[in-house]
Image (cartoon, rainbow, N blue to C red):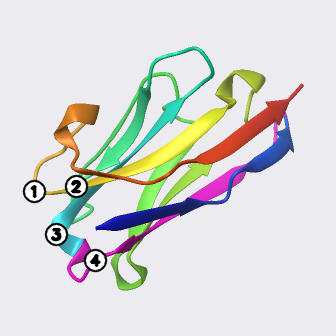
Amino acid sequence: VQLQASGGGLVQAGVSLRLSCTASVRTFSSYAMSWFRQAPGKEREFLAAMTANGGSIYYASSVKGRFFISRDNAKNTVYLQMNSLKPEDTAVYSCAAREGTSLYTRGYEYDYWGQGTLVTVSS
């Protein structure tokens, strides 16, 4: 399984950005998906997770209400809509995938990782 994340860039504080992550897999609907980020000098941080069927979603408290995860199984793609971006949102954003029907929120629970896309938010 290969994951390709895209959509990052340099933006000003307050704007919105949507990240995409496309999976090269035949049965995307069997994979739980999530987004994580890692800021310079900090540990990887969980952001959002969605079950394989899209029925359950969980957000980290740090982004709840600003970030929204969604998926399009027909396009093998998961999205992260990020609103009201702040300079502290600056990080490399990565998507992760694993087969399973549960909601997974810990990095070690995921088998496949994308290469990450850099988001830089200027003040």
Dot placed on the residue nearer the N-terminal end, 3 or 4: 4
Pointer 2: residues within 10 angstroms few (<14), some, or many (20+)?
A: many
Q: What residue type is labelled 4?
A: Val
| Left or right: 47 as drawn, with respect to 17 | left
Q: How far apart are marks 1 and 2 (CA)?
A: 6 Å
Dot placed on the residue nearer the N-terminal end, 1 or 3: 3
Which range is magenta? 13-28
The vertical placement of 101 against 27, above or below, is above
| Left or right: 111 as drawn, with respect to 59 | left
Residue 47 image offset from top left, x and y in percent:
44, 35
Q: Which of marks 4 and 1 is in front?
A: 4
Q: Nearer the viewer, mark 2 or mark 3?
A: 3
Residue 83 visible in the current orientation: no
- Magenta stretch encompasses residue 111: no
| Left or right: 45 as drawn, with respect to 110 | right
Q: Mark 2 points at which residue?
A: 51
Pointer 1 and pointer 2: residues touching (CB < 8 Å)?
yes
Dot placed on the residue nearer the N-terminal end, 2 or 3: 3
Residue at the top extreme, as displayed: 41
Indicate the secondary structure of the residue bearing disc 1: loop
The vertical placement of 47 against 19, above or below, is above
Q: How far apart are marks 2 and 4 (CA)?
A: 16 Å
Indicate the secondary structure of the residue bearing disc 2: loop
Q: Mark 3 points at which residue?
A: 30
Residue 101, numbered circle:
1
Dot placed on the residue nearer the N-terminal end, 4 or 1: 4
Q: Which of marks 2 and 4 is in front?
A: 4
Dot placed on the residue nearer the N-terminal end, 1 or 2: 2
Residue 31 image offset from top left, x and y in percent:
21, 63
Q: Nearer the viewer, residue 68 or 113?
A: 113
